[in-house]
Image: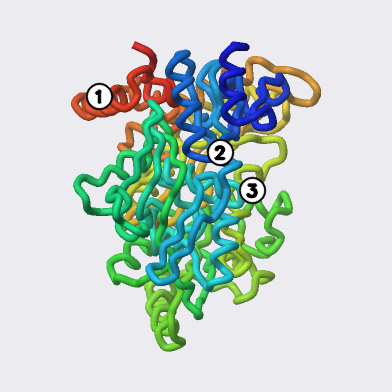
């Protein structure tokens, strides 16, 4: 390994490479408390050329490489699967390269965070539409493209961040560098269109979870932020799951251009109030869920018409009770949009109960189906009570299963932020090794259930990509084709080795 280290050090200089035990352990985990893979080397390249050279060395030495953006994923996607290999930390590549105001396209390095990009764009009264994932303050744009991310805000209007993709610069696992879209033509002076010049090769790298190439440069459409916005929050009536689903379907059937539409279960309202996370909800009925919307418009008349149509659906047709207009009244919609709460909300809900950590199973499902799936989650919880109660005997607290916010995305789909929170093995100064074993068994069981719903995974990482293969969810010819593409682009399975059970031959 010393010889490999020296080769890599020559590429990036001593300052941007480490094999320190402390550094390696710092890069060995992501958000979940279970999965760990300790790399041999951590390296921070500055551009596509350096990444190309790193990957060439990795191929020569047959050592796996895992790209890491913000490291916010919850499925074990940006650390090695097992120990060893190289973690390719993209944070050094965090600059805006160009803003083409005429064509409304921004080009950035892939390691830039969604927060930094949107802070830059706000000075031009622009935004990225979908504001990236819920962890967008630190999540990278490259990671968002790799995961088809949604969640930061604007998802009902703009869908996944890949919808805005114009072109990519990608370093292939062998070290070759390609550009997609309009930039595949060497005479193109600026990125302006994704589709054309033959097949949409950019699509291969959208949602690939880092197995087919390292994104280094990304061009996205950007949008003018409308000058008018309205945001309202409502308490749902009984059967809030079914009513919230019906509201989402009605909004889509009416063709109302809503920016965000989100349902929050009553249990989240209750826990958030009890633990002081959302004091503005303390006066609400604790057994009721809430729903909120945000709409944008270019004129007051347009805004008033959208609000009128939405209130007709939510209040008159579905008997929801409006909450007051201010954040202090409980109007989370205003905080979510006006105060950029979309980047503070989601992961705080995972941590609403102190000391618990997320074992997420978030996925995309049809809006008409999530009430049924929430009921199945309740049944899963009861079926696994014996295992879940083992934590209670030691901690006095039972793990919590269910779903965080459920929000409208592309078409009639929602992101179902389901999963459960549990205790890591280290608790109250002691190691409880049985916690890890139980958590992993429960997590796999939960993921198998979600997979067999026919749900669509996006942030797959280690866990979901392997579960899909292990339960034979992929149609045989689909998986065969995916493996053939992987083998063609990455003959030695260097990049993100082990995802989708793609190991060395």
Q: Secondary structure at mark 3?
A: helix
Q: Which residue: 60% across, 43% down? A: 350
Give the percent coordinates (x, y) of residue 382.
50, 31
Q: Nearer the viewer, mark 3 or mark 2?
A: 2
Query: Nearer the N terminus, badge 3 or badge 2?
Result: 2
Which mark sits nearer the N-terminus, 1 or 2? Answer: 2
Query: Is disc 2 placed on a helix, strand or loop?
Result: loop
What's the CA distance linking mark 1 and mark 2? 27 Å
Placement of the C terminus among the 4 image quadrants = top left
The crowding category of the residue bearing disc 2, from other C-alpha atoms within 10 Å (few below 14, some 14 to 19, many at least 20), is: many
Circles 3 and 2 in contact, beta carbons < 8 Å = no
- The x and y percentages for residue 356 are 66, 35
Q: Quadrant of the N terminus?
A: top right
Which residue in the structure is indicated by mark 3?
348
Residue 261: tell me if it is visible: no
Residue under numbered circle 1:
484
Mark 1 against mark 2, which lies toward the viewer?
Answer: 2
Q: CA distance from mark 3 to mark 2?
A: 25 Å
């Amino acid at each position: 390994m010393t010889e490999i280290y020296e080769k890599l050090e020559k590429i990036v200089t001593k300052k941007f490479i480490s094999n320190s035990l402390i550094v390696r352990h710092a890069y060995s985990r992501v958000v979940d408390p279970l999965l760990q893979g300790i790399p041999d080397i951590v390296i921070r390249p500055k551009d596509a050329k350096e990444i190309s050279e790193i990957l060439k060395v990795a191929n020569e030495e047959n050592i796996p490489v895992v790209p890491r953006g913000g490291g916010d994923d919850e499925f074990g996607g940006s650390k090695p699967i097992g120990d060893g290999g190289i973690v390719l930390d993209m944070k050094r590549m965090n600059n805006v390269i160009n803003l083409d105001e005429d064509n409304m396209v921004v080009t950035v390095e892939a390691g830039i965070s969604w927060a930094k990009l949107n802070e830059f764009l706000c000075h031009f009264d622009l935004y990225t539409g979908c504001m990236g994932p819920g962890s967008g303050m630190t999540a990278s744009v490259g990671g968002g493209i790799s995961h088809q991310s949604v969640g930061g805000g604007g998802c009902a209007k703009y869908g996944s961040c890949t919808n805005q993709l114009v072109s990519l610069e990608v370093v292939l696992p062998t070290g070759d560098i390609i550009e997609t879209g309009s930039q595949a033509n060497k005479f193109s002076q600026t990125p302006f269109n994704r589709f054309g010049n033959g097949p949409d090769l950019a699509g291969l790298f959208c949602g690939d979870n880092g197995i087919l190439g390292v994104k280094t440069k990304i061009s996205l459409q950007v949008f003018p932020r409308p000058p008018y916005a309205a945001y309202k929050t409502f308490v749902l009536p009984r059967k809030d799951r079914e009513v919230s689903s019906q509201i989402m379907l009605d909004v889509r059937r009416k063709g109302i251009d809503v920016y965000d539409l989100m349902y929050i279960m009553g249990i989240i309202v209750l826990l958030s109030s009890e633990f002081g996370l959302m004091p503005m909800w303390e006066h609400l009925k604790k057994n009721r869920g809430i729903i909120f919307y945000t709409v944008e418009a270019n004129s007051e008349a347009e805004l008033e018409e959208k609000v009128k149509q939405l209130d007709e659906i939510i209040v008159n047709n579905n008997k929801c009770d409006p909450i007051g207009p201010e954040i202090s009244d409980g109007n989370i919609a205003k905080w979510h949009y006006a105060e950029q709460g979309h980047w503070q909300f989601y992961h705080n809900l995972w941590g609403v109960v102190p000391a618990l950590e997320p074992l997420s199973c978030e996925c995309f499902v049809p809006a008409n189906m999530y009430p049924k799936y929430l009921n199945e989650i309740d049944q899963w919880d009861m079926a696994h009570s014996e295992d879940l109660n083992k934590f209670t005997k030691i901690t006095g607290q039972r793990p919590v299963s269910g779903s965080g916010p459920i929000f409208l995305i592309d078409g009639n789909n929602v992101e179902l932020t389901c999963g459960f929170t549990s205790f890591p093995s280290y608790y109250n100064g002691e190691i409880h090794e049985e916690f890890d074993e139980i958590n992993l068994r429960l997590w796999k069981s939960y993921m198998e259930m979600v997979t067999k719903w026919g749900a669509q995974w996006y942030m797959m990482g280690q866990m979901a990509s392997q579960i899909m293969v292990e339960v034979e969810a992929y149609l045989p010819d689909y998986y065969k084709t995916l493996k053939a593409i992987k083998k063609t682009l990455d003959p030695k399975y260097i990049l993100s080795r082990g995802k989708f059970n793609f190991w060395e031959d």
